[in-house]
Amino acid sequence: MSKKISQRKGSSTRKKAYKAPDFLVDLLNARSPTGHEYEAQAVVDKEVMPVVDEYRKDTMGNRFATVNPKGDPSVLFTGHIDELGLIVTYINDKGFVYFDTLGGHDKSMISGRRVSILTRDGIVKGITGKRAIHLMSAEDRKKVPQTHEIWIDLGVASKAEAEALVRIGDCAVYDQSFELIRGSVGVARAFDDKAGAYAVLEAVRRLAKYKLSARVTAAATTQEEIGTRGAITAAFSENPDFAVAVDVGHATDSPDCDPRKYGSFNQGGGPIICRGPNINPVIFEHIVAVAEKSKIAYQIEADPRPTGTDARAIQVAQAGIATGLLSIPLRYMHTPSEMVDLEDIESTVQLLVAVARSLKKGDRGVW
Ligand SMILES: [Zn+2]
């Protein structure tokens, strides 16, 4: 474990440039605000459908990619493809566009962004504006602006001009695409949870080459950010024996994250394996044993409540599903510049592959 970590630390100073996987980069750059996951779905359809045994879509927009469909036990890996966004609610007389938020935004970070609005005629560019500090009272400068005090400026002069470009209900995301900034460390606006979606889908792409006992399905789920809604129907329709949700988790190794409150998790330290009431003890112990055997560095987190991930919905679907959770360490969650060490994503893929290969006919999570 420590050896693996020290290799990782060295990766930042390696001379050879780190190459991010194209599939991951395409997912990160796909604009997929909650409920409007079209661009991410298209990437998944293109990259995953051709290499698996079965592929299916549902009315929530979820994608399901299965290898070894007749296998036993059945396993579901999930990662959500939706991301935070803005949804247009009102256009005023001058053509300024007002919005509500999709998902849990840090409101101090919404203004001053370039945004791409997804419209029926393609992408429309704008910026999020608010009153300049020079025009604020000393008192107002201390406050975080409310959503209705920020608007999208399309650079137009009238309501008619704005309405020709944008409709009520169109959605936007920030123009903050993926970039590697040092070694294997990257920044993007939506590692949450394109990192996890990539991990589960890439795992299944690799598993297609092995002889397995288990049936393995990777689901790219939708609408996680507003209440794990894609996972609710995905878990119901798949009804697997085991499930592992993969999401991002807080790396608490940046300043001001008190480990006494939030635990100690490192970027570059490997996937975080969750333990607590939301996690089936059989699958937890199994994942840890596989990580040990495969010499994959990992971290353990305790969560005393239903987690804020797809695992919350999956565990209590149908008659109960033996559910585990892996989290990829991430700094600055739900901000326009989330940071992840891509080596942690790769270790997560390897762990999922190893877990799927280790499951034997008849394995169940009953305890
Ligand atoms: Zn999130």
Image (spheres, rainbow, N blue to C red):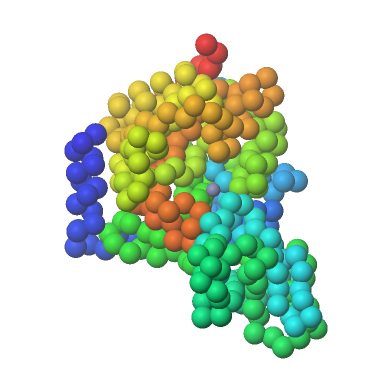
Give the residue drawn at x 59%, y 76%: 131
Horizontally, residue 367 falls left or right of residue 168, namely left
Please give the name of the residue rendered at 48% of the width and 66% of the height, measured from the top-left corner: 177
* Picture quadrant where residue 181 is located: bottom left
Q: In the visual, does 67 lie left or right of 357?
A: right
Report the front residue among 177 and 305: 305
- Residue drawn at (68%, 57%) of the image: 36
Q: Is residue 65 at all visible to an observer of this figure?
A: no
Examine the rendered structure and indicate whether residue 307 appears above or below residue 174.
above
The x and y percentages for residue 106 are 53, 56
Q: Residue 171, located in which quarter of the rendered image?
A: bottom right
In the picture, the quarter occupied by the N terminus is: top left
Residue 307, relative to residue 362: is it above or below? below
Rendered position, 25 above or below 325: below
Question: Where residue 77 appears, x then y in whole percent?
Answer: 53, 36
Query: In this view, which residue lies farthest toward the bottom?
Result: 157
Asked if residue 73 lies left or right of residue 7, the reply is right
